[in-house]
Amino acid sequence: MVLEGLSKSLRETLRKVTSAITIDAKLIKEVIRGIQRALLQADVNVKLVLELSRRIEKRALEEKPPAGMSPREHVIRIVYDELVRIVGEGKTLPIKKQIIMMVGLYGQGKTTTCGKLAQYFKKKGLRPALIAADVHRPAAYDQLKQIADKVGVPFYGEKESKNAVELVKRGIEKFKRSADVIIIDTAGRHKLEEDLIKEIRDIANAIKPDEKILVIDASTGQQAKPQAKAFHEAIGITGIILTKMDGTAKGGGALSASAEVGAPILFIGTGEHLADFEGFDPAGFVSRLLGMGDIKALLEKAEESLKEKEAVKAMERMMSGKFTLKDMYKQMEALSGMGPLQKIADLLPFGFSSKLKDIDMRETQERLKKFRYIMDSMTEEELENPEIIKASRIDRIARGAGVEHKDVKELLRYYRMTKSMMKGIVSNRKLRKALMKQLKFT
């Protein structure tokens, strides 16, 4: 879960609103104190927290709910709006020919992020290339080379070179005709030092990159602010990528850094794997923090595994109440290309993620893989009408899949549970209407 601690604290605070009999000044102050505590514990800048508190209190006490919106929903909407405001505006990198310079301190995940960014552009149909400009860290060349090989993109570096500026010039010359996006991995240090600042300034002056992106570890805390300021003053940061946003990282200091330099957050890294990388959408990000899910991001992930029309069609069938083993099989195929199950669950609204919290996600992923093998041993009729699968059919399916009878029965139980859960959403008009609206089916 992205910023799990902050998300949990904010959701617990908003629960006071949803369970309140009346919305009054006393409750608003109590909610604001809870939000302040959650944000400060997450290392969000104190000044930003106080500004946020004043705006929420003023709006919650003075604004009247729009027609059709209850006072509770209105307060939650205000909190949502103001959190989106402090997170800042997102920005999407243009899909065009460009040079990108990556900067940041050592240990922030910069080199891995270069690979993730290269994969992002490759998926968009461009030809990225990587340049290893860290001439100080011995392992930097090999690390970026391995990442380039894994992504399947060209790489340039000089193991013996000690002149980063000239190295970068030669790398750009090599790729200027064969690559669309040139990504430069510059050197980092354990702390801000004058020679680091001078080197990145010299590189920026020599090559005039289109984008100068600062990479910050989400666990950096309040030190993120002076870091961002120093890099911005040196080269003029055009965007920020936050790494290691998964798990227990506080993240507030890194989020505050964006506001400090006025540079938008471009992407967030949510794990070590190349696929653990997503464009930053402030509205979707805050929605997930508050437990509302992010259906837009979920569909984007699905569309990487399925054609867009197929992804939407599958969702439409589920929401209409039609759900067979064949539909479930298609879901599992899509899931296998969408990353770890917990990260997908985090994108779902209505508290789905918290319901799955106690399950070992890795074990569940393996179980889903086994389910697909079992379904491969079923006939078309059995996939379309699971109700006909009785003892004799279970025996045949188990032998065909090389599993035990209990595994086939477990699959059928899982199917019935999933179908029941979908039926619950369909029968609940409010939930169904909200989800259908997000999916733009209505």
Image (spheres, rainbow, N blue to C red):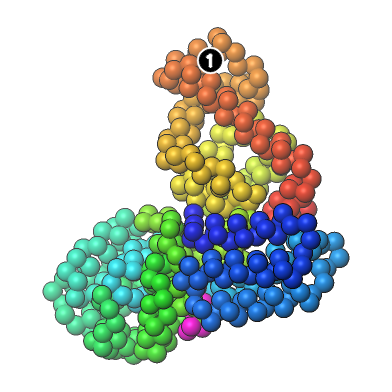
Between 57 and 173, the one lying in front of the other is 57
- Dividing the picture into quadrants, the one containing residue 244 is bottom left
Residue visible at 33% across and 69% down in the picture: 108
- Residue ID for mark 1: 394
| Residue 275: x %, y % from top left | 42, 55
Residue 48 % position (x, y): 55, 79
State the residue lying farthest toward the front. 26
Residue 14 versus residue 91 in the image, above or below: above
Which portion, as a residue range, is magenta?
Answer: 260-265
Q: Quadrant of residue 37?
A: bottom right
Q: Is residue 406 left or right of residue 29?
A: left
Q: Residue at x 58, y 25 (%)?
A: 413
Q: Compared to 341, does 253 lie above or below? A: below
Out of 111 and 50, give the one closest to the viewer: 50
Whether residue 395 sits left or right of residue 349 in the image: it is left
Farthest right residue in view: 67
Point 20% across, 76% down: residue: 135
Q: Is residue 121 above or below residue 438?
A: below
Q: Is residue 49 visible in the rendered structure shown here?
A: yes
In the foreground, 145 or 413: 413
Q: Amino acid at mark 1?
A: Ile
Give the side of residue 294 with respect to residue 169, left or right: right
Q: Secondary structure at mark 1?
A: helix
Which class describes the residues within 10 Å of circle 1: few (<14), some (14-19), or many (20+)? some
